[in-house]
Image (cartoon, rainbow, N blue to C red):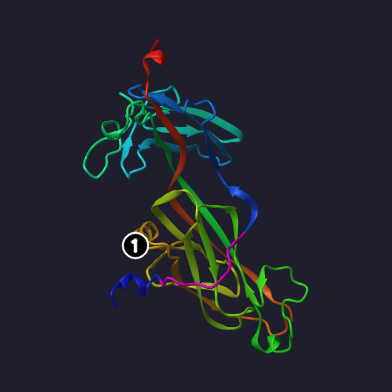
């Protein structure tokens, strides 16, 4: 065994993508607009990029976004830019109140002294200009990438329907899901997410449903979507009790029991953060359901709901190409 973390987080699952049921967008919608920004500058001129941060916040609490700006020279060198002050920019963050309509706040990023055009060199160390024939122009344009990073808190929410049925009653049914509208693959019940999220959260079991009496293993799966951005911190992973007469959570290993939920321990949350930041593998958190007190006279499955919330910090990345031009005497005039 080379990595003890894999005893708890196994890098495999074979369920489908979670279905997003209520809204194909995130619960709090955040985007950036560069339409008012200049993107072409002369060499040595201050590079100033403007961006509008657009947020729709349906939550009761204010929503905070922390911006940072970077310039990349396409050779893996990155330089952080200065954020200019504004009335809405306080303490390094922008705050958006509850509103069903879009709210906008502008940020301005500056690179003092501008950027330079780097002359290419051949294997002898001579610049293009030094070995170019008479009349041939030296390099007069350079491309850079501007990046706006927005760090914010997100809560991903998932639900999984659990159907139970007495073992003897279940044996009498060819198709226990006949007449039931459900998200199924065969008799495997697939979970759903209420809103889209940069982090996919899936709940499920490899066992067919309905479940009869006994202990049934299930998993909560975490995996980053393939979008521009980084998960910088998993803050909490919480599984809520079904509050059902027939279904309850058995205390999973390394979860802390609360009033009506279980929370992943701080040690395992830290390991989950490390794995999601360093590897493109799903995280499988093992749990157990206890099914009991089923009524043998009921010939249709009973439904309970297991839900999970994952709170995390996410750094969205928005890019704008920047062009640097060589300034000629005529252009200065």
Q: Residues within 10 Å of mark 1 (few under 14, many from 20)?
A: some
Q: What residue sits 53% from the left and 25% below the top?
A: 36
Q: What residue sits 43% from the left and 72% below the top?
A: 252
Tell me the quarter of the image containing the N terminus. bottom left
Depth check, front residue: 259 or 184:
184
Residue at the farthest right position = 179
Q: Is residue 16 magenta?
A: yes
Q: Position of residue 333 (x, y in %)?
A: 40, 10
Secondary element under disc 1, as helix, strand or loop, is helix
Depth check, front residue: 95 or 242:
95
Depth check, front residue: 132 or 211:
132
Q: What residue sits 39% from the left and 29% below the top?
A: 324
In the picture, measured across the screen, residue 49 lies left or right of residue 32, that is: left
Q: What residue sits 44% from the left and 22% below the top?
A: 87
Chief SS of the magenta region: loop
Report the residue marked by disc 1.
271
Question: Is residue 96 shown above or below 25?
Answer: above
Query: Could you say which quadrant of the image residue 315 lies in?
Result: top left
Q: Position of residue 106 (x, y in %)?
A: 48, 27
Query: Could you say which quadrant of the image residue 256 lies in?
Result: bottom left
Question: Is residue 272 shown above or below 195?
Answer: below
Residue at the farthest top position = 333
Question: Is residue 48 shown above or below 272?
Answer: above
Residue at the farthest left position = 124
Q: Position of residue 60 (x, y in %)?
A: 55, 40
Magenta span of residues: 10-19
Q: Is residue 329 magenta?
A: no
In the picture, measured across the screen, residue 142 lies left or right of residue 96, that is: left
């Amino acid at each position: 065994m080379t990595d003890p973390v894999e005893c708890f987080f196994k890098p495999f699952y074979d369920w489908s993508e979670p279905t997003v049921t209520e809204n194909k967008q995130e619960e709090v919608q955040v985007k950036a607009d560069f339409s008012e920004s200049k993107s072409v500058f002369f060499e040595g001129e201050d590079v100033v990029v403007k961006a509008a941060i657009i947020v729709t916040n349906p939550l009761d609490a204010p929503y905070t976004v922390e911006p940072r700006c970077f310039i990349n020279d396409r050779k893996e060198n990155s330089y952080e830019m200065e954020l200019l002050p504004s009335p809405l920019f306080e303490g390094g963050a922008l705050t958006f109140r509850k509103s069903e309509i879009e709210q906008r706040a502008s940020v301005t990023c500056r690179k003092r002294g501008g950027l330079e055009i780097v002359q290419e060199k051949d294997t002898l160390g001579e610049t293009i200009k030094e070995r170019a024939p008479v009349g041939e122009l030296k390099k007069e344009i350079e491309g850079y990438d501007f990046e706006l990073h927005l760090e914010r808190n997100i809560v991903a929410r998932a639900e999984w329907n659990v159907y139970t049925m007495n073992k003897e009653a279940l044996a009498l049914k060819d198709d226990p899901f006949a007449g039931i509208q459900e998200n199924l693959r065969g008799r495997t019940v697939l979970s759903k997410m209420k809103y889209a999220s940069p982090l996919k959260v899936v709940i499920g079991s490899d066992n067919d449903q309905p479940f009869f009496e006994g202990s049934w293993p299930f998993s909560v799966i975490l995996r980053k979507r393939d979008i521009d951005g980084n998960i910088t911190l998993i803050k909490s992973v919480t599984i809520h009790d079904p509050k059902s007469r027939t279904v309850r959570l058995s205390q999973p290993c390394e979860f802390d029991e609360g009033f009506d939920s279980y929370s992943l321990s701080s040690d395992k949350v830290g390991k989950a953060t490390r794995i999601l930041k360093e590897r493109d593998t799903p995280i499988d958190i093992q749990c157990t359901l206890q099914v009991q007190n089923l009524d043998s006279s009921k010939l249709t499955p009973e439904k309970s709901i297991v839900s999970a919330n994952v709170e995390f910090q996410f750094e969205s990345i928005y890019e704008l190409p920047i062009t640097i031009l060589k300034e000629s005497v005529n252009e200065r005039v």
